[in-house]
Image (cartoon, coloured by chain):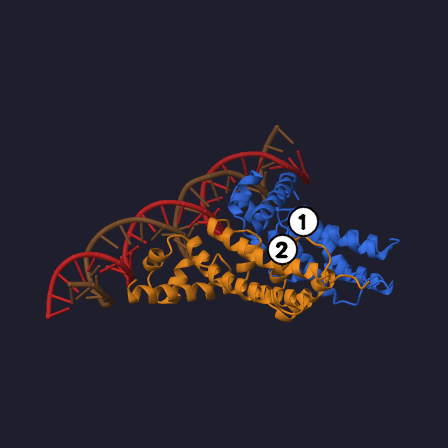
Chain colours: A orange, B blue, C brown, D red
Amino acid sequence: MRADARRNYERLLDAARSAFAEHGVDASLDKIAQRAGVASGTLYRHFPTRLDLVEAVLAGQITELGDLGRGLLDAADPFDALRTWLRATIIHGVTYRGLAAAMMNSAIRSDLVSGLHAQLFEVGAALLDRAWQAGAIVAVDEADVLKMAGGIAWAAQDDPAQADRLLALLMNGLAAPRP
Amino acid sequence: MRADARRNYERLLDAARSAFAEHGVDASLDKIAQRAGVASGTLYRHFPTRLDLVEAVLAGQITELGDLGRGLLDAADPFDALRTWLRATIIHGVTYRGLAAAMMNSAIRSDLVSGLHAQLFEVGAALLDRAWQAGAIVAVDEADVLKMAGGIAWAAQDDPAQADRLLALLMNGLAAPRP
DNA sequence: TTGCTAACCGGGGACATAGTCCGTTACCGT
DNA sequence: ACGGTAACGGACTATGTCCCCGGTTAGCAA
C-alpha cells in the first residue's frame, strides 16, 4: 500500500470516528472527507459504501473491548471483572454516540458487523457465565445484559456520571441475593 | 374549525404516529402527508414545523401515561403499581420507536416538550417515592429510573418480550433486599 | 340557494447528500 | 533519474427532502 494511501486511510478513519461520535452513524460522508483533508472521491476509493466505513471504525473498537474482556477472565473477582468490562463497554457506547450501541442493537446488519457482534457477545457471555458459576450473580440471559448495556449507553449519551449510576442499578439487579 | 380541516388534522396525526413508529422522528414529512392522503401544503398548514407535529403526537402519548400513573397512585401494592406504570411507559417507547424514548433522553428540546417531560417525570417520581416510603425499593434517583426506562425502550425496540425481561432485571435492581 | 373565505392541492425552488467519472498528480520500483 | 500506474481531486449527476405559493375547491352561515 502506497504511503499516501495509507496516510489518507488513517486520516479518514480518524475523521469518521469523530464524526460518528458527534453526529451518529448518519454523519455526512462529504464532511468526513473534508474533515480528513481529502476529496470525496478518495473516501469512496477506500470505503465504497457507508457500511464499509462503519465496519472499519467498529472493528477497532470491538477488538479493544474483546481483548479487555479476555484479559479479565483471569481476574480474582468475577463480579468485579464483569462490572469493569461492562463499564468499559458502556463508556465506549457513550463516547461514540450510538456506534457500539447501534451495533448491540443490530440497527446495522452485515456479515462483518454480525461477526463483530458475535465476538462481543462471546466475551460478555464468558464473563457472565464465570460470575454465575462463582455464585456472584443470578441466572440471566446473556444477550439481555448486553442489550441493557447498550440501552444504558444510549440513555446516558451526554452524561458519563449518569452512566455509572445506571450501571450500578444494573449490577444491583444482577447481584445474587445474600443467602 | 371546519369539518374537513379537523378530519385532515386527525389523519395527519395518525399518519405521523405510524411514520414516527416506523422510521423514528426523522421520518419524511412529505411521505407522512402522502400517507394521510393529503398534499404537503396541508400538512404545513396544520403543522408549520416538524417540531409542531412531534409535539402534537407526543402530547397525546404523555397525557395517557400521566393519567395511568396518577390512577396507579391509589393501588394496593406500590411496587406492583410502579412496575405496571414502567411497563406501560416502556411499551409506548417500544411501539413508537424512540419517540417517547427520544423525549426521555431530551434529544428534542422545546418548551412544550419540556413541559411534557416534566409531567412524565412528576408522575414517575410520585410512584417511586410511594414505593420507597413503603419500603419496597431502595433509595434511588428518580431521573435515573426514567432514563433507564428510556434505555430499555430503545434497546428492545423490535422485541416486546425482551423489553419485559429487561424490565424484570431493572425491577430486581430496584427491589429492597429482604431483611 | 348563494357567495364568502378557509382550506386544499400539487408543482417547483432551494438545498443537502450519496456516489461516479476522468483528467491530473506524485509515489516508488528499477 | 524516470516512467508506469496507483491514487487523488473535485466537478457533476441523481436523489430525496423541506417548505412556499398561487390557483382551485368546497364547507358553512345567512
Q: Secondary structure at mark 1?
A: helix
Q: Is residue B94 above or below residue A17?
A: above
Q: Is residue B177 left or right of residue B63?
A: right
In the foreground, D30 or A136: A136
Q: Secondary structure at mark 2?
A: helix
Q: Is residue A160 left or right of residue A138?
A: left
Residue B160 on image: x %, y %: 67, 46
In the foreground, A171 or C20: A171
* Quadrant, the C terminus of chain B: bottom right
Crowding at mark 1 (Cα within 10 Å: few <14, some 14-19, many 20+)? some
Instruction: Kindly identify the amino acid type of the residue bearing the numbered disc 2.
Output: Lys
In the foreground, B104 or A157: A157
Quadrant for residue B114, please give it. bottom right
Q: Are marks 2 and 1 in contact (CB under 8 Å)?
A: yes
Q: Looking at the picture, do discs 2 and 1 lie on one chain?
A: no
Instruction: Work out whether residue A68 can be spotted.
Output: yes
Residue B157 on image: x %, y %: 62, 50
In the foreground, A99 or A22: A99
Crowding at mark 2 (Cα within 10 Å: few <14, some 14-19, many 20+)? many
Q: Which residue is located at x 51 percent, y 55 percent?
A: A116
Quadrant for residue B109, please give it. bottom right
Q: Which residue is mark 1?
A: B162
Mark carried by residue A147: 2
Q: Which residue is located at x 78 percent, y 54 percent?
A: B83
The residues bearing labels 2 and 1 have C-alpha atoms spaced at a distance of 9 Å
Residue B171 on image: x %, y %: 76, 57
